[in-house]
Each structure stands twice: as structure tokens, then as C-alpha cells.
Image (tube, rainbow, N blue to C red):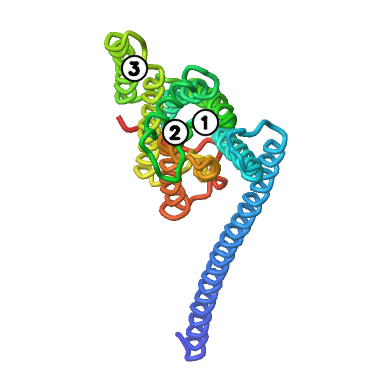
Amino acid sequence: MVTNNMLRHAGSSGSDGVSMGDTNQNSQQHISENGLSTSLLSMETNTTISRKQQRCKILRWSFYLVLGGTLLGLTLPKNTNITSQTWQLLSNIIGYTYFLAWSLSFYPQIYLNYQRKTTQGLSVDFCCLNVLGYVCYTLYTTNFYFNKNVIDAYKDKMSSLSDNDNTTTQRKGEITVTGNDVAFAIHAIIMATFTLSQVGFYDTFTARPPSKRVYIIFFCTAAFCLLYILGTWLYQGQVDILGFLYVLGSIKICVTIGKYVPQALMNRSRKSTVGWNVWNVILDLTGGILSLIQLVGDCWAMNDWSGLVGNPAKLLLSFITITFDGIFLIQHYILYPENEETYSPLPAIESIDMK
């Protein structure tokens, strides 16, 4: 027979059991919420620290870049066509600073490929077209700088354009290709070839072949150059070397646009810039801005604005570089703001080269 005391005792025990269960559940939920808050706080702190470290890194390397450009500018030969001694020195410093910026821009990507042991995230089309572009640019700059026949032909052409020019602007026909332009072009073709070789070494060209578009561009470039050489030889009785160099400069400009587009499209398709080193972009942008400043400043100092028309490759390359690097920075920091350091050395990234 169940007594009232027994019923009261059972009710009390049941009530205590529910109360204890609720307490344990609330405690676990509280611990979970605290853990989540701690995790979010930790992530926010790490992000803040990472951004501060990146800003410090940018400032530190900017100092090294300016210091190196200044030392090279002070010690290496200057452009004697510039009459102003002050701008002659500043032009040399700016030129070798841009030389260092553009030259160093290859190394972060090369190191990233080595660190990850893969080139996934880097467009193969970009690498192939980079080599083609710098072959053309090296031939362009070295001939304008070293080839006496080209220099004389350029001056004759610029002089003929200014025969009827009665303005205060005197077109002297001085070449604006400088020693740092040549040094960069030679260094660039070596580094671009090395980066392309990393695709074959880490991923093989069988797994990551260039698209058909690249083969078409290579074929059209070779065919156009041969037809131009043959055509001028048949029509003029000799090869128009100056005109051929402008053809190479035009090819370099078109290839530069063509090489950036696949990488920008790949970043958009993957919604990520992992595998595409942002330091490459920052240094490339720095070089483009300084190259443009040097070219415009040299023309101003020599009172010879024909140098802008006479060196279209350098002028347009600066504008194209600035434009596309701006797009890449927007992709990296705004559209797809991911920190490459949070990824493992071998992230699972699919190749999405545009076919």
C-alpha cells in the first residue's frame, strides 16, 4: 500500500531529477557558447595580427626596395640624353627601383610553387604567354638599346616627323629605352621560363596542358612575324628592322592582356586567389607605376614628348599592368578575402584553366 509520504518522496525525487538534467543541459550549452565565443575571438585576434604583420612586411620591403633602387641608381650609368643633372639622378633611381620591383615580383610565385609542391591555382596559359611576351620584349629593348642601326633609324624617323614642327617642343628623337629596361627584360625571360618549368616539374604538362588558345596565339605570332619580314624584304629590298621591333612591342602588349585575362577568370571561377601570390601583384603594380613615372619624367626633362609615341611598349605595358593588378588586388582583398597562410601546403584545388 502506497502511503502519502511515499508519493511525496517520489514526486520530490522526480522533480529533483528534472532539475538536475536541466542544469546539466544548460551548463553544457553555456560551455559550448563560451567555446564558440572564444574561438571567434581567437580567429578575430589572429586575423588582426596577420593584417598587422602583413602591413609591417609591406613597409619593411618597401624600404628595402627604395634603398636598393637608390644604391643602384647612384652607382650605375645614367641617361646622358637628359640635360638636367637632378632628374638624371632621380630617373636612374626610379628606373632601378622599378627594375627591382618588377624583377622581384617573380620570386614570391616561384617560392609559393616550391612550398606547396604544386602550381595549382596558377594559370598555365599565363605562364606560357608570359614567356612569349618577354621573348618579344627582350628583343625589343636590347635592339633599341644596343643596335646602332636601330637607334639611327629611330632618330631619322622622329626627325622627319618634326620637320614642320614650329612649336616650342623640340623633338630630338632620343630613345627612352634605358639600361634598367634591358636588365629587367633579360631577367624576366629567365624567371618566366623557370616558372613555366615548375608546371612541368610539379604537375606535368600532361596533367595541366596549355589550352588550345595558347597554341593558336603562338602560331599566329610566328606566322605574322615571318610574313612581316618577308613582305618588307620583297617590297623594300631589305628587312624593316625598326618596324619589326614595333611589331614585337605590339605583340608584347597584346600578350600581356591575354596572359592576365585567364588568371583573372580563374580567380573568379574558383572564387579564390589561393595559389596566386599577392606579393607578385603588389610588386608588379609598384613596377608599373614607377615605370610610367620614369617614362613621362624623361620625356619632360628632354623636352621631347615623341618618346611616348616612340616607346609605346613601355607606355602601354605600364597602363595595362596597373589596370590588371588593381583587379587582382580587388579580387584578393575584397571579393575573395582569403589568407593563404591558413591553407595547408597542399590545398585541394582543382585546375580550372580556361580551355
On the picture, is 229 further left or further right than 197?
A: left
Label 1 to label 2, Cα distance in Å?
7 Å
Q: Which badge, 2 or 3, comes first in the chain's sequence?
A: 3
Quarter residue 243 falls in: top left
Q: Which of 236 and 348 is in front in this view?
A: 236
Horizontal side of residue 216 vs 149, given as left or right: left
Task: Write down the residue under mark 2.
Answer: 311
Q: Could you tell me the amino acid type at mark 2?
A: Asn
How crowded pointer 2 is (Cα within 10 Å; few <14, some 14-19, many 20+) is rated as some
Q: Which residue is drawn at 49% across and 78% down?
A: 18
Q: In this view, does 142 lie above or below 15?
A: above
Disc on res. 13: none
Question: Which corner quadrant of the image does residue 167 belong to?
Answer: top left
Q: Label 3 amino acid?
A: Cys
Which mark is in front, 2 or 3? 2
Q: Which residue in the protein does label 3 denote?
A: 225
Q: What element carries label 1?
A: loop
Label located before the other in sequence (1 or 2):
1
